[in-house]
Image: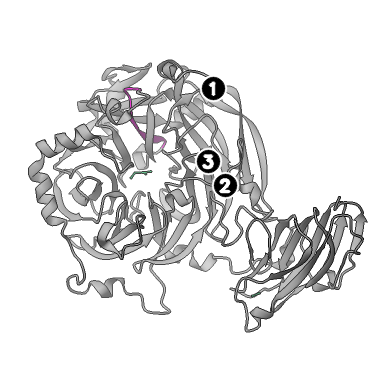
Amino acid sequence: MARKIPRPFVLGLVAGAATAVFAYACRTTGPKGVLDGDVASRVYVAPGEHDEFYAFLSGGFSGQVTVYGLPSGRLLKVVPVFSQHAENGWGYSEETKPMLETSFGFVPWDDAHHPQLSKTNGVADGRWLFINANNTPRIARISLETFETEEIIEIPQSAGNHASPFVTPNSEYVVASTRFSVPVPQRDISVADYKAAFKGTISFIRANVPGQMDIAFQLVVPGYNYDLAHAGKGPSYGWAFFTTYNTEQANTLLEINASQRDKDFVAAVNWRRAEECVAQGRGRDVPVTYAHNYMGETRVARSELKRGVRVLEPADCDGVIYYLPTPKSPHGVDVDPSGEYIVAGGKLATVIPVHSFSKMLAAIEAKDFEGEADGIPVLRYDAVLAGEVQNPGLGPLHTEFDGKGYAYTSAFLSSEIVKWKLGTWEVVDRIPTYYSIGHLMIPGGDSEKPWGKYVIALNKITKDRYLPTGPELVHAAQLIDISGERMRLLLDFPTLGEPHYAQALPADLIKDKVVRVYDIQRNRNPYATLSEADARVERTGGTVHVYMTAIRSHFSPDIIEGIRVGDTVKFHVTNLEQDWDVPHGFAAMGVQNAELLIMPGETKTLTWVPKQPGVYPFYCTDFCSALHQEMQGYVRVSPAGANVVLTSNGAGQSRVLASGGGR
Ligand code: RUQ
Ligand code: CUA
């Protein structure tokens, strides 16, 4: 969600809703300092105690995921996903570089938006977390045993992978849809041909088996902007819902040109029907290329290019997709725990429209259409509407549920959370947020059984909430108590990048299965050195492999000679420790990438092409023991063509398997 608000819209609002804006403005001189009553004790987690919930926040334009404890708001970990992470060598080490491969080659950054926990029977099951890359369309799977990214799949024929990666109730699929329609197939064509040649795609990606993520099928849809999604559940299991905007199909100045129509659509996709059509051979295979990257058992990532995707046209599969008219430029779409209500957040709407799934089915049955859009039936608004929430705040975006019959909607422009009742649609409470809330998140709040208790406001702007830090300020989360009738602000905490969306689950669901060390007996890295007796160096032409071990508090070998300028040196460092929380680091002077942070039992590889003769130290970067500062060594680099013999003081046999190199 951009911070800029279309000018005509702002003017309209100021004129039309001045009273409302003033009313909000009075309220936004909100709490500073002391809050009421026992607020501090509600978020206080005593030293040594654990939080009740794990919360996973999108790192936005950092490309990563952050893990916080709730209610304390303590940052527990940054999980690198789509961006190189010098802190631990993610995307720099040879074992992890393939994770960032795409059909465009190596892509070291992306913009992550929506974390999604895997689900079983519609409830988060603590197996994995998925998250999308918005810029170069991809979806990642993070293991909740290791808290590491273990798989990434690229989405072909997509651009701006924003409506992604929302999971179906048993994680059969994660969905992905194009925010930016593009020529399908991609080709050299004028943007003036937008309406004729630009398409959207809605992809269903099989997600339930690690290592086997793949595009099951893609639906080609009209060239609108597909913004967000949520899967149906309960009675609506088998369906998925996507918001669209820019049904005007504008391709320039969208702030005005895509805000013309009173209503855009929620697209309702019957994925069970799509499966049938695909099984009947109604799809066609399109020759596209996309990357699939997997870490797997060896913990050495592999990247493969897949070819071909099964594409389905709505015209070849009747009943697969319907459009539900939805005011106005909708953003979020959220399905309530019962699966009956589909709530859309119209950025420019004055109400929150709530569609009824059962009415939708009846309207489909009765062919109660108000027309067609590119051959896709458009259902009549009144025929599918369950109700409208009046006075919902300005710029409603996203809705989450507490499982007790209430919905909570974020309002970006009026910076507040609005609580309303499902069924009566009346607003029962509202609380200001600081400032410009985007998503909000209740633990389990998009599932069939919300855990409730808190809502987190994920705010785009912090302004005066913290000490100033130059022009750039952090984004922020605010923890709000929803256990009572009235919402109550408990805590502010800063976030990394832009915390678009988040997910949370009770810590008990995962904390006991979290991996503490990698079993060295199961280390399958082909360059592992499993004992100090094998520590050695080997030359194969211009490449020197250093088989190195690390254990408190030394490297073996710690003296290496016979490297020449122009060689490619690969430091394969195996951490021999088998104790929790004893990583070792590795860095060498002049190395042009990053450090390695090697977990117990793991092997990681850093590549170095030395440029100048000299003797260079390397050392452990992670304070691992009282004698951590002693954990160091030297590499001697001789000029190209020098005849210094390759040696090391490792106990293993250093060898020249093929001479040459060093030019
Ligand atoms: S967005 S503020 Cu999910 Cu990227 Cu709504
Ligand atoms: Cu090993 Cu410090």
| Observer able to see residue 118 | no
Residue 72, located in which quarter of the rendered image? bottom left
Residue 230, above or below 30 = above
Nearer the camera: disc 2 or disc 1: 2
Where are the magenta residues, as a range? 238-249
Which of 631 and 454 lies nearest the eye of the viewer?
631
Report the residue at 74% width, 61% height from top: 572
| Magenta span includes 241 | yes
Mark 1 neighbour class, 10 Å CA radius: few under 14, some 14 to 19, many 20 or more: some
Q: If you read the primary sequence from the N terminus, does the residue marked by circle 2 or circle 1 appear first?
A: 2
Residue 540: give x, y in percent of width and height. Answer: 87, 53
Residue 315, above or below 235 = above
Nearer the camera: disc 2 or disc 3: 2
Residue 363: give x, y in percent of width and height. Answer: 27, 24
Which label belongs to residue 99?
none
Alpha-carbon span between mark 2 and mark 3: 13 Å
Direction left: furthest residue: 19
Per the image, label 2 sits on a secondary structure element best described as loop
Q: Is residue 219 left or right of residue 531?
A: left
Residue type, numbered disc 3: Arg
In the picture of the structure, the residue carrying the numbered disc 1 is: 185
Which label belongs to residue 138?
3
Quadrant assignment for ligand 2: bottom right
Q: Is residue 582 left or right of residue 337?
A: right
Alpha-carbon span between mark 1 and mark 3: 18 Å
Residue type, numbered disc 2: Pro
Residue 370: give x, y in percent of width and height. Answer: 25, 18
